[in-house]
Amino acid sequence: MASISTSLVLVALLISLLVSLSLAGDAFVYYDFEVSYITASPLGVPQQVIAINGKFPGAPINVTTNNNVVVNVHNKLDEDLLMTWAGVFQRRTHWQDGVLGTNCPIPPKWNWTYQFQVKDQIGSFFYFPSTNFQRASGGYGGFIINPRSVIPIPFALPEADIVIMIGDWYTKSHSDLRKTLNGGKALGMPDGVLINGKGPYKYNDSVPDGIDFETINVHPGKTYRLRVHNVGISTSLNFRIQDHNLLLAEVEGSYTVQQNYTSMDIHVGQSYSFLLTTDQNASSDYYIVASARMVNETTWQRVTGVGILKYSNSKGKAHGPLPEPPQDQFDKTFSMNQARSIRWNVSASGARPNPQGSFKYGSINVTALFVMQNKPPVKINGKKRATINGVSFVNPSTPIRLADKHQVKGDYKLDFPRRPLKGSPRMETSIINGTYRGFLEIILQNNETKVHTYHIDGYNFFVVGMDYGEWSEDSRGTYNKWDGIARTSAQVYPGAWTAILVSLDNVGVWNLRTENLDSWYLGQETYIRVINPETAGHPNLALKTELPPPDNVLYCGALKKLQKPQRISSAANNPIQLIFTFVMIFAVILHVR
């Protein structure tokens, strides 16, 4: 009996120790993602789509500020895969970014575990596959970062969170669309718009019978938080709900001054958070609409997604014409003025108790200016390519920082031009040499005929100005230097410019790209390399600003020989699982005794 009692005491002590270890510091949150093909018919045509754990779209990742997020990705596709976390910036851990300049891809039938901390961040984001044009077939889902319970939010707690993924859609597979681009052709008009992976409600006879549509169920007299993401390929969409206002509350990690909109233009790669109050009568259901913008709306009429908002006491189906989009076909300033109206809530707490607007970006001296111009695709060496400043980016065979660590020479050049090249365009692995703790002013100049959305991994930035025409030094007089929104994406209208300011305080190599998937695929991107010079020769000091490559780092290119055999792991291998394992071991010991 004494032996058994001693063993029980040991079990109790072990459990206590393991629980204390598992609860020490910031919590861990675990996800297993099986990325595979399934067959679906969102527009009535059976096609291959990419699912997460058998679902299209994938379920949202839902975490809290400062959580450590562990996502074990199993690649069940027939090609390489990387997952990226758009807008979720990883402090000190750019190795987890999931783009080709920072990670070797996950081969088919392999798994790879991402681990990063959502440090000092809140808001609405999404994840998606970043390679091989795969986002055109799905593989995406929401990414919610909730504030800690001790930090107040600037509105009453909503009844529920509702994630809405909207985006243009083709009935061709991503590999067929990729072949079209490789052949030098444009993709043409999409076949439709999906809402949460589903096609349009049959609002008129142009919609075929039998299409599954999205229904969002609500109760009357409540307020819901809608997190809306444009995960499409290249089409700006206007989002609206019949007879309801959308109260804008948050944009990509920043609370906004709360304003009502009857509709909102949401461009590719952008995320918005609205408060929806169900204050209408329930005589019928209501249309949810996402329709193409900045196009000939008559020709593009089929590129419209329609879902249903259904009150629990609804008395009938939605009927009649869809709510109209903004009537601004001949007014190119409407959408821009709407974007300019979005303001940062400088009195609200963000991820920390201090007001999120206490960062006085308008008084910081700019250390470098980049005027980044895109043009319509051109032929370079016989291939159709997209460019920024005359450079079409070529992904390195060895990820950039990994090449640094192993002294691989010639992998890239630190010579990205600060202004558009005057000579012929070229294809190169040319990146920006960023100054640690520098403050960049980046002018995004769009010389194409479609809207572009630009994004920088690892950072949010301040959108301080936009206008039509060519940017000049005098344009700075129009900047908003007080409450311009801090976000992770910025749209640039055709024939216009957008100015952003970014503080380079996150060490690593970070992707700067257009979110328009076709132009991104054709080379419209670069990277910003940010290294802390104070850590040279001081490895302990270096850990404060940049973690070393993880133990499971993948190797490719010049370092391919360093790759170890695949080791299957699971996100379920967490402290609680270890507790269970040890308890079972001791139970066996007791049973034997």
Image (cartoon, rainbow, N blue to C red):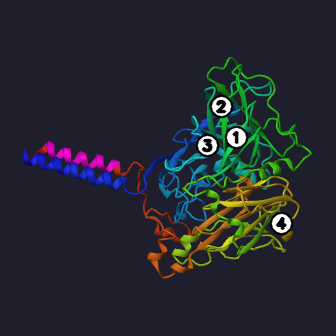
Q: Does residue 483 lie above or below 160 as drawn? A: below
Between discs 1 and 4, the one toward the N terminus: 1
Asked whether disc 1 touches disc 4, contact meaning CB atoms under 8 Å apart, the reply is no
Determine which residue is flagged by label 1.
247
User: Is residue 389 depicted above or below 331 in this figure?
Assistant: below
Q: In the rendered image, which residue does mark 2 sit on?
A: 214
- Crowding at label 1, few (<14), some or many (≥20) Cα neighbours within 10 Å? many
| Real-space Cα separation, disc 2 to disc 4, in angstroms | 45 Å
Question: Residue at 77% of width from left, 64% of height from top?
Answer: 387
Q: How far is the residue under mark 2 from the one under mark 3?
A: 27 Å
Q: CA distance from mark 3 to mark 1?
A: 11 Å
- Cα–Cα span, label 1 and label 2: 22 Å
Q: Earlier in the sequence, mark 3 or mark 4?
A: 3
Q: Quadrant of the C terminus?
A: top left
- Secondary element at image label 4: helix
Question: Where is mark 3, residue-wise?
Answer: 155
Q: Is residue 499 above or below residue 208?
A: below
Query: Which residue, as the protein is rendered here, is positioned at the far front?
Result: 347
- Label annotation for residue 458: none
Residue that mark 4 sits on: 477
Q: Residues within 10 Å of mark 4 (few under 14, many from 20)?
A: few
User: How many discs appear?
Assistant: 4
Callout in the foreground (3, 4): 3
Does residue 584 show up magenta in the picture? Answer: yes
Tell me the magenta residue range.
Answer: 576-591
Q: Disc 2, disc 3: CB below 8 Å?
A: no
Which of 52/17 is in front? 17
Question: Residue type at mark 4?
Answer: Gly
